[in-house]
Amino acid sequence: MEPQHELVGLPCGAEGPHLTATLQPPGFMKGKPPAMRAVVDLHVANPLFSEIWLLYNATGDYPGIVTQIELRRASLRGAWIWTFSGSGFVQAVQLAPGADVMLRDVELMFTSESRVPAVYFADRVSIAGQSAAYWFGQQSLAVSRGEYSLRSPSLAQESKLDAAEKMPIEIEVQCMHPLAGEIDVQTNPSTACVL
């Protein structure tokens, strides 16, 4: 098994990207132990003059090696959801410069042993030295304005990479945003609140 590489970043400052997260009812839901999940709405703003990536469901780790990339969207004009899997797992949405978007129905997955997850903002996601969009012949799939539901996205494109090549993924994290601070998900699994 390949080693996991932890995503690290300083908390986002006032000048950088920011978000507000609202936990949707019924709150935290238990799955097969130790799995937990929650559905949140994320109001995300990118005040920068460059594209950034919003990364979630990394649960502290991201794949050092990627073997599959998926592109999904919930509607014809929906936001593109990237999924990178391999020696780990992470999902992402690209945000255009000056973006101000509401991402609804974002499903967060985490374990009861961990804290409620953080989301990360990254300047760049590349695979084998190429931008992630390159693998689908795209320059960018970033969203800039609007409201998008991420509920039940359909697979639009998929790229299974040759596992023998062990394609490295590089994520340049700009900052991170903890979603719930110190909420104890084990003892308070049905709390509904603004995170």
Image (cartoon, rainbow, N blue to C red):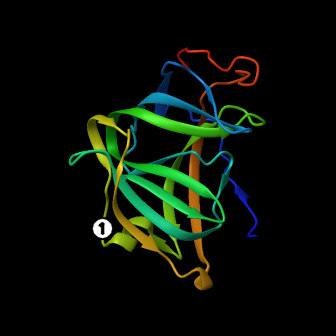
Left or right: 144, with 114 as reference point: left
Residue 144 position within the rendered picture, expressed as x and y whole percent measured from the top left? 28, 42
Residue 105 position within the rendered picture, expressed as x and y whole percent measured from the top left? 41, 32
For the residue labelled by badge 1, is the local secondary structure a helix, a strand or a loop? loop
**On the rendered image, what quadrant is the C terminus found in?**
top right
Q: As rendered, which of 47 and 167 lies closer to the eye?
A: 167
The residue pinned by badge 1 equals: 138
Q: Quadrant of residue 135?
A: bottom left
- Name the residue at 32% across, 40% down: 98
Residue 21 position within the rendered picture, expressed as x and y whole percent measured from the top left? 49, 25
Tell me the amino acid under the disc marked 1. Answer: Gln
Compared with residue 63, is residue 181 higher up or lower down, i.e. above or below? above
- Name the residue at 76% across, 70% down: 1
Q: Quadrant of residue 62?
A: bottom right
- Name the residue at 56% across, 15% down: 192
Q: In which quarter of the image is residue 99?
A: top left
